[in-house]
Image (spheres, grey):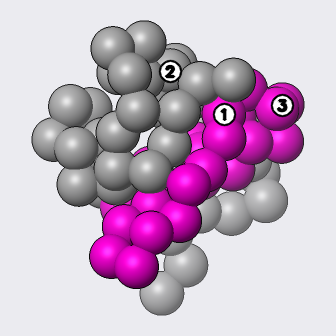
């Protein structure tokens, strides 16, 4: 099932950017793991990971990988 098309990439980029802003604001309080980000932002997993990719590409965040979690913080 196709969820979005090439014609809709501008809308998708805008949504990812908006979600990146939500994550940025949540991280202003300090480092968070994925579960805490999900709770703080009310985003779905795929939305969180797309927005994290956006922020990572812009060198705005860092990751700490533990045995159980992925922890994210602002650079």
Q: Residue 45 lies in what quarter of the image?
A: bottom left
Mark 3 and mark 2 residues within 8 Å of each other at the beta carbon:
no
Residue 13 x, y percent position in the rendering = 69, 37
Residue 58, horizontal then vertical, whole percent: 83, 31
In the image, is residue 62 above or below residue 45?
Answer: above
Left or right: residue 55 versus residue 39 is right
Q: Label 3's element? A: loop
- For the residues labelled 1 and 3, the Cα–Cα distance comes to 8 Å
Q: Is residue 55 magenta?
A: yes
Instruction: Estimate the spatial distance between the alpha carbons at disc 2 and disc 1, rounded to whole Å.
Output: 9 Å
Mark nearer the N terminus (2 vs 1): 2
Q: Which of 57 and 73 is in front in this view?
A: 73
Q: What kind of element bears circle 2?
A: helix
- At which x and y percent is residue 50? 59, 53
**Apparent side of residue 74 relative to residue 24 in the rendered image (left or right):** right
Taking the image as drawn, is residue 9 in sight?
yes
Q: Does the magenta stretch include residue 71?
A: no
Looking at the image, which residue sits at the far left?
39
Q: Name the residue under label 2.
A: 24
Q: Residue at x 45, y 69 (%)?
A: 66
């Amino acid at each position: 099932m196709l969820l979005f098309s090439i014609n809709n990439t501008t809308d998708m980029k805008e949504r990812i950017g908006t979600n990146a802003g939500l994550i940025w604001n949540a991280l202003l309080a300090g480092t968070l793991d994925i579960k805490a980000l999900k709770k703080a932002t009310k985003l779905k997993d795929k939305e969180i990971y797309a927005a994290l990719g956006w922020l990572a590409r812009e060198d705005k965040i860092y990751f700490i990988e533990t045995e159980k979690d992925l922890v994210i913080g602002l650079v």
